[in-house]
Amino acid sequence: MIFDTHAHYDNKAFDEDRETLLNSLAENGVESIINVGASLQSVKNTLQLIRQYSFIYGSVGIHPSEAKELTDSWMDWLETAATEEKVVAIGEIGLDYYWKEPEPQLQKYWFIRQLGLARKVNLPVIIHSRDAAKDTLDILKNEKAGEIGGVVHCFSYGVEMAREYLNLGFYLGIGGVLTFQNGKKLKDVVRYMPLSRILLETDCPYLSPVPFRGKRNSSLYLPYVVEAISQIKNIPPEEVIAATNQNARKMIRNIPYNNSICAG
Ligand code: NI
C-alpha cells in the first residue's frame, strides 16, 4: 500500500473535510502518512494529528522561511516534541533562497541547529531545499548528515545534484511535479536514480499531479505519480508502491504500523 512521506493535512485547505478525507484513505490504498511540520503552529497541529490517527506519523521542524520563529527555548520545546511516540523525523528543515527572507545566514544557522537536534534524538531529517543546492549540500557534508540520514523532499535539482545527494545516502522525495509537462528534469532524475531511493510524497495541499494540477492535492492522487514512475522505470505500478513503502519504512527505521494506543 501507498506511503505518503510528506503531507500537510493540518493545512486549512483541509478544514472542511479533513476527517472524511483521512478516513477514506485506507480503502483507497493509502496505508501511512508522514505529516510534516513547517512552523511552530504546524508542529503543534502535527502532534494533534498523530495522536488522533493511528496511520499518521509526524515530523517536527521549522521550515527555512519560518526560521525567525526559532529561539533556544523553542529548540528545547522541539526536542521534547521529537521524543513523542510516532514522531519519526526532524523537518522540514533546510534552505530556501527563492524567497529573499530571512537572510541566508539565519537560515543556515537554524538549519545546522536542527540537524544537531536530529543527531541528538536519533531521527532522520526531511530536507527542504529550493534554489540552494550547493549550500544545502555543503552543510550536509560538513555536518556529516549522511550519518543522520533522511530525504530531500520535492527534489527539484538535476541529475548531477541527485548523484551528490544519493552519494550522501539520502532518499529523494518524488511527487506531482513528475507528471508536469515541464517536469523533464525530474523525469531524468527518476530515470537515473535507483528505485531503492525513491520516496513517494504529495506535499499536499500543494503540487497536485496532472490532471489535477492547480487543484487541492491529497494522498488519493498518488497513483498518478506511481504511474509516471512505473512508465519511466518500466516496472508494474504495484512494484513501485511496494518498493517506495519499504523505502519509507527503512528511512523511519522500521517503526511499525499500528504502534499507537488508538490502533485497533
Ligand atoms: Ni512541505
Image (spheres, helix red, strand yellow):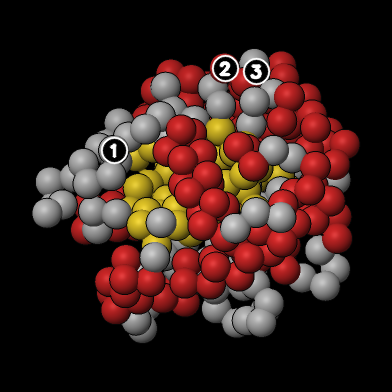
> Which amino acid does the dot numbered 1 rest on?
Pro
Residue 224 at what x, y percent from top left? 61, 70
Q: Where 62 falls versus 262 (above or below)?
A: above
Residue 236 figure quarter: bottom right
Tell which of 229 and 144 is nearer to you: 229
Which disc is residue 256 wearing? 1
- What's the distance in space between the residues labelled 3 and 2, CA to CA? 9 Å
- Left or right: 237, with 106 as reference point: left
Residue 62 located left or right of residue 138 = left
Q: Is residue 100 left or right of residue 60?
A: right
Cβ–Cβ below 8 Å for labels 3 and 2?
no
Does 239 sit above or below residue 170?
below
Answer few, some or many: residues within 10 Å of disc 1's Cα (few below 14, many 20 plus, some between 14 and 19). Answer: few
In this view of the protein, can residue 44 be seen by the observer? no
Query: Callout 2, which amino acid?
Result: Glu
Q: Compared to 50, does 164 lie above or below?
A: above
**Closest to the observer: 257 or 134?**
257
Q: Which mark is residue 147?
A: 2
For marks 3 and 1, the one nearer the N-term is: 3
